Amino acid sequence: MDKQQPSKGYRTFVLVLLTIVYGFNFIDRQIVGILAPFIQKDLGLTNTELGLLIGLAFAVFYTTVAIPIAWLADRYNRVNILSIALATWSGFTALTGMATNFIQIGLARMGVGIGEAGGSPTSHSIISDMYPKEERASALGVYSMGIPLGVMAAYFATASLMGTSNDDVNWRQVFIFLGLTGIALAVIVKLVIKEPARGAMEFEGHTEIAKPPFLSSIMTLLQIPAWRAMCFGSAFGAFVSYSASAFQTKYLITLDPNFDFRTLVIILGIINGTTYAGGAFFGARLADKWGKNNVRAYGWLPAIAITLCLPVTLYSWWVPSVEAHLLLTTLFLLFFGTWLGPSFAIAQTLAPVNMRAMSTALFFFILNMISLGGGPTFTGWMIDLFSENHSEVESIRYAMSVTSLLLIPSMASFLLASKLLPNDWAKAEKANQELVSQ
């Protein structure tokens, strides 16, 4: 373990590399939604099965396995755990491209979930030991840009590997290519990142931190009110975004079958890589700047952004053209990206320094069981339900309109977090001081 303070250049390099890894996390997670129409047609899946494949089959393993892996990451070498996790989920991504039925592709997606469970808890913990709390939201905001950049890369990979027509999309080739690339990246991570000292940003020169029992870590985090409110705010917001991304390409090519699919995925990639990434970056910077004067800003900013998202996303499903939908999607992603950095910062700063990987894992357990597990599954079921009396386009519109209403409890949860933050923030600083003095 390196007890030296990292140089600015090195920690920036590590942050960029971890962001790329997070991008691969989302490439391998979101590519199913992008290629959904072709996978569904090839394997003969219902909308409910497709929703299960994108959501619950992945989320159950991703969220539950993350907790024991995080417990290990709070004790052992995080770089080793991260590189093994990346190689694992990339290998199962490649296997996804070899599936011939729902059971096989479902098992492969479960494997991807198991591997990805070791990604963010270890990365968040590493970043928090390289950046002080005053810069943590900004650093984690950069890291969170892996989400839109990964989604953008997934769209671009689809566009580059597809044939000359909308019907000529070799979805299997896309999965195999991405999986093999991720395995190569895992080797790079192992070779170039050094394990940082735990708590180095809070306690200079002090690295021997007590390691809490498994259940004690979970109970400690669940007893922090602002931490809980932030988790539910994030979960309800992501419920809507995961549902939208799962069925968006299916909706758009149904809305206008003549719209060129390659052009569509390139546009969606650019939107995610610019406005969503920009929202994540500037939202995190604004939260750190605003938060220096009032820590409530880490709750206020996401609440404002989610409030703006609600009318935009509702309207986006009822406009008559693909172009109008994409324009409103651009605005939605700009607002939506701003909650990422502040939420990640809350999860890390309110957690004791010896529970940071566990904090991210438990945060993602709550977030993804609700959003990733519930969102696409619930929306897919509603689409099938509405389709009994409506066209496919109308069924998706009604289903997404109902789903979008989950932004209301998201906004309320972030407002509650803003109210609770000053007290819990002060308690966290005091608890960490007591921890290091033991």
Image (cartoon, grey):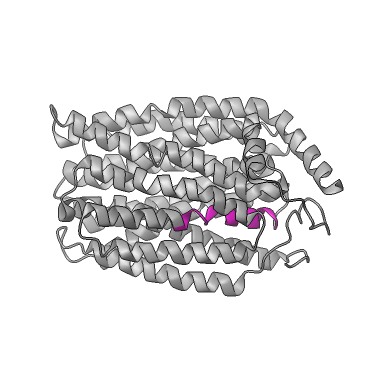
Left of 211 or right of it: where is 80? left
Q: Give the x, y percent position of residue 276.
A: 45, 47
Relative to residue 381, is residue 128 depicted above or below? below
- Residue 248 placement: quadrant: top left
- Name which residue lies at 41% across and 45% down: 60
- Residue 51 placement: quadrant: top left
Q: Give the x, y percent position of residue 203.
A: 81, 52
Left of 110 or right of it: where is 409? right
Q: Give the x, y percent position of residue 145.
A: 51, 53
Left of 222 or right of it: where is 380? left
Number of numbered discs overlaid on the protein picture:
0
- Name which residue lies at 13% across and 33% down: 391
In-front residue for pair 340/88: 88
- Name which residue lies at 35% across and 47% down: 57
Relative to residue 245, is residue 100 depicted above or below? below
Q: Which residues are magenta?
A: 115-129
What secondary structure is the stretch in magenta mostly built from?
A: helix
**Can residue 413 be seen from the camera position used here?**
yes
Is residue 126 within the magenta segment? yes
In-front residue for pair 346/320: 346
**Can residue 149 be seen from the camera position used here?**
no
Q: Give the x, y percent position of residue 191.
A: 58, 75
In-front residue for pair 11/68: 68
- What is the quadrant of the N terminus in the image? bottom right
- Name which residue lies at 36% across and 34% down: 313
